[in-house]
Amino acid sequence: MPGARLAIVTGKGGVGKTTVAASLARAAALEGRRVLLVEIATPGRMASVLDVDDLPADPTEVHPNLWAVALSEARALERLVEGLLPLRFLSRQLLSSETFRIVAAAVPGILEIALLAQVVDWMRGGSRARTSYDLVVLDAPASGHSVPLLSSPRTLSGLATIGPLGDVVRRISRRLTDPKRTMAFVVAIPEDWAVAEAIELVASLRDDLDVPVARPILNATFPRRFSKKDEKLLDEAEHDGTIDPELLAAGQYFLRRRKAATKQAKALKKGTGLGPVELPFLFSSTMTWDDLDPVSDALRAGLAS
């Protein structure tokens, strides 16, 4: 994704999008780019992948070239109000009002706009960004919440057409729909339900919201370990007992998982018109920053091809 400043990683829950977001950030950081990894999805999950106790509330460097932050709706709303009301005492008075918070939460799209406004500010190196980043990777919510998040500029544009808030909404919309600045990555695994959701999500982002979409990510795919000759030998061994039953079962399991990956990769390509990037299944009892190398390497190679 040459030149992109914002990478949005999303997909149905359980497909490993947090791992993919971290791997994407790792690939860029290892290339020397200054990367900010933003978590607004499941709190705490990213911290374990990055080998830190908790993600900070403000961008903090956690690895060379990698900054990380956990962004909450409350914090994002505070930043939005502070940006719209330059006089600090006015913004503090407003934010201290419980009535305002209740009303704000009831306005369609306002909390989502607050989240995106902060992400865009980091992306553009605005006045509230302490560090200039080459790439912001957003670990976005699962599919059902990502679409409302990314559609919030349209949702709110009918309510805020003039004034400072209108300017914020238009700035966000311009960046989200600019393929030179933004790219969305939809993640699936080789399962019917995950691929069907990914196809629907790609259509929603690309066709309905005009958000640029990269090649879909097919995560946790088993490697190709057997040739056609090997497959024939496995089939024969099931009948003549020439292979230990446990080894035979393991071989057949690998073969089934590889065939499932091939089938679902074809379905993704047919449903989206984009050939997916296949990421390897990690045969590891841990999931730490250094364990992500195989996934980062596959992402780098897949996106470059």
Image: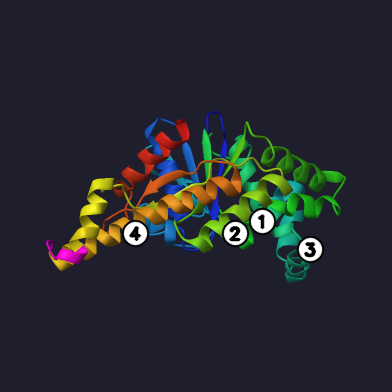
Q: Can residue 128 be seen in this view?
A: no
Dot placed on the residue nearer the N-terminal end, 4 or 2: 2
Which marked residue is nearer to the observer: mark 4 or mark 1? 4
Q: Within 10 Å of the Cα at label 3, are there few (<14), some (14-19), or many (20+) other Cα atoms?
A: few
Mark on residue 256? Answer: 4
Query: Can you give x and y, in whole percent of width and height, for residue 255 in the image?
Result: 30, 56
What residue is at 47 percent from the left and 35 percent from the top? 303
Query: Can you give x and y, in whole percent of width and height, for residue 218 in the image?
Result: 46, 50
Identified by mark 3, the residue type is Val
Identified by mark 4, the residue type is Arg
Dot placed on the residue nearer the N-terminal end, 4 or 1: 1
Q: Within 10 Å of the Cα at label 2, are there few (<14), some (14-19), or many (20+) other Cα atoms?
A: many
User: What colour scheme governs how the chains and residues are painted in the rendered image of this protein?
Assistant: rainbow
Q: Within 10 Å of the Cα at label 1, are there few (<14), some (14-19), or many (20+) other Cα atoms?
A: some
Image check: 43 left or right of 95? left
Q: How many marks on residues?
A: 4
Residue contact between numbered discs 1 and 2, judged by CB atoms under 8 Å? yes
For marks 3 and 2, give the CA distance. 22 Å
Q: Which range is magenta?
A: 238-243
Q: Look at the numbered disc 4 and give the secondary structure of its residue.
A: helix
Identified by mark 2, the residue type is Ser
Q: Is residue 224 above or below residue 239?
A: above
Dot placed on the residue nearer the N-terminal end, 3 or 4: 3
| Location of residue 121 by image quarter | top right
Q: Mark 3 points at which residue?
A: 107
Q: Within 10 Å of the Cα at label 4, are there few (<14), some (14-19), or many (20+) other Cα atoms?
A: few
Dot placed on the residue nearer the N-terminal end, 3 or 2: 3
Image check: 226 left or right of 47? left
For marks 1 and 2, give the CA distance. 6 Å
For marks 3 and 1, give the CA distance. 17 Å
Image check: 34 left or right of 208? left
Q: Mark 2 points at which residue?
A: 143
